[in-house]
Amino acid sequence: MSDAPARFPWWIPVGAAVIALGFARTLAAPFDFIDDGNLVYPAPAGTGADGHARIWWANVVANVEHLGPFRPTLWLHWHAQANLFGADPLAWRAYRLAWCALAAAMLLWLLRELRVPAVPALFATAAAVWNPYRSEIWTSLTLAEGVAMPYALFALVAARRAAHSARPLWWDVSGALAVLIALGCKNTFAALVPAQMLFRLWPDDLALRAALKRNGVRAAALAVTLALPVAHFVYFKLNWHPGQYEPAPPSPSQALRVLNGLKGAVALDLMGAGLAAALVVALRARGALGEFRAALAGGAVLVAAGAAVYLPMSAFSGRYSMPAVWGLDVLFAVLLTALWRAPRGPARSAAIVLLCAGLAAVLATVVHRQDKTAARAKMLWAVVHHLEATAPRGATVAWVGGDPARGALGEEEGIHVQWHLANRGRADLRIVLLDATDKPLARVEVAPAAPASQPALRVNTGPPAPGWTEDATFATTYQLGRKRYECATSRPAAR
């Protein structure tokens, strides 16, 4: 039992950098209107170290009080980046691109530790990182899963290294710290711990009984990190109040949402034909999978635990597929390895062609989404610039929302417009959120306007409302000019 060779494989950093370039188009995108409005602006000039610490901790506490999550390391990242990069979107996006490369490198490293050869590992990692359903963690600048991903995957790497190291203490300690950092981004990363314990417990050269005897205590010790999410959950339940996240009982409908989400997170619609062909070839080849015992068991545990943590909810999104989908990424890499080692023939060649076509479609789709996201942000920034330049002092602005999937403005976008304006020197402007029928929407993120105040401007899609006249129109195109986003401001008609 010994450490792996000291020389780190060159293909891991090079491959990770090339994979991250799939998001190079984000470098030309401005800040978005998802989380950026209240996170990208630095503290006032002259703030000392104690002032930064107070701001950071105040944000952590406010997050717990308003929504419920305890995310100290996530807020530390946000606060540090805001003060390092200022309100410079290029600096933020260049950093996010580098962070994406680091996350890809960690997944490649994990696959290498699980005995996956370079080519299958690179293919599986590219498919994982470029996946359109979960790519929002890279097209957006602040989502917790993107911040936590390098730490989370390194925790699994460290467990695997510790299982085979003659001096495992450093790997054990660093792996536990990495889990704590990931938990400080989002409590759902507690799902990492069972897979981490399995990787630590069961090295390749031992039977399970011998592994339990040699490594059982140290593997079990890794579970101590679960004290943090357990303590938070107890505090959350004892102090819950309206406005915070409200867990729902597990239900068949949520289980179906999770399964559908995992299907999207492996791009089954784009990669399904190649996956099926690869599975047929692998089954026919009947290659020995004993050397992938840890990968198969750990991947399955990660899928199960990652899916379970999202069952007490009533919704699902692309980023919620993590960390469960990382288990599917590991299993996919094992399948690709079996295909890679299968005897040459028409079936193997067909499977490789189908998989490559699927990967090309995945990349094309994620590039299109980057263009679409940037186009939306550019339109909204045109609105911000117009309001800050032309709106009267102290004016109220009506933000008419609807379903963004159908081209309407989103109420969350209106909230972030308010925050961007406030941080850019127009805190005097007040955004009032309205639904498509002009009914006011109550949101804790924005203060309500005075009952007697009349909007000086109105932002909406479509023609001006009765009694209003068009002021300015803002439009951007994407998909080579074939599609467009458009909205307009209007003012009360002269009487």
Image: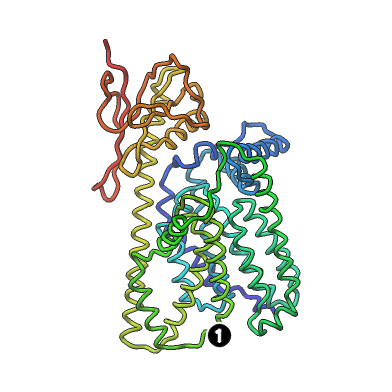
Residue 78 image position (x, y, % from top left): 59, 44
Which secondary structure lies at badge 1?
helix
* Residue positioned most to the top: 495
Q: Which quarter of the picture shows residue 457?
A: top left
| Numbered disc total | 1
Q: Which quarter of the picture shows residue 413?
A: top left
Relative vertical location of residue 281 with respect to residue 161 in this rendering, above or below:
below
Q: Which residue is mark 1?
A: 290
Residue 363 image position (x, y, % from top left): 37, 62
State left or right for residue 363 relative to residue 159. left
Using a 10 Å C-alpha cutoff, classify the residue at mark 1 as few (fewer than 14 neighbours), some (14 to 19) or many (20 or more).
Answer: few
Chosen colour scheme: rainbow
Q: Quadrant of the N terminus?
A: bottom right
Residue at coordinates 42% horizontally, 83% vertically from top-left?
A: 282
Residue at coordinates 37% horizontally, 33% vertically from top-left?
A: 401
Instruction: Give the camera-side residue of 90 and 383.
Output: 383
Residue 346 image position (x, y, % from top left): 30, 86
Relative vertical location of residue 294 with respect to residue 190 in this rendering, above or below:
below
Residue at coordinates 61% horizontally, 34% vertically from top-left?
A: 43
Relative vertical location of residue 210 with respect to residue 250 in this rendering, above or below:
below
Residue at coordinates 44% horizontally, 77% vertically from top-left?
A: 336
Residue 159 image position (x, y, % from top left): 66, 70
**Which amino acid type is shown beneath numbered disc 1?**
Gly
Instruction: Give the camera-side residue of 390 and 300.
Output: 300
Relative vertical location of residue 135 with respect to residue 49 in this rendering, above or below:
below
Q: Quadrant of the C terminus?
A: top left
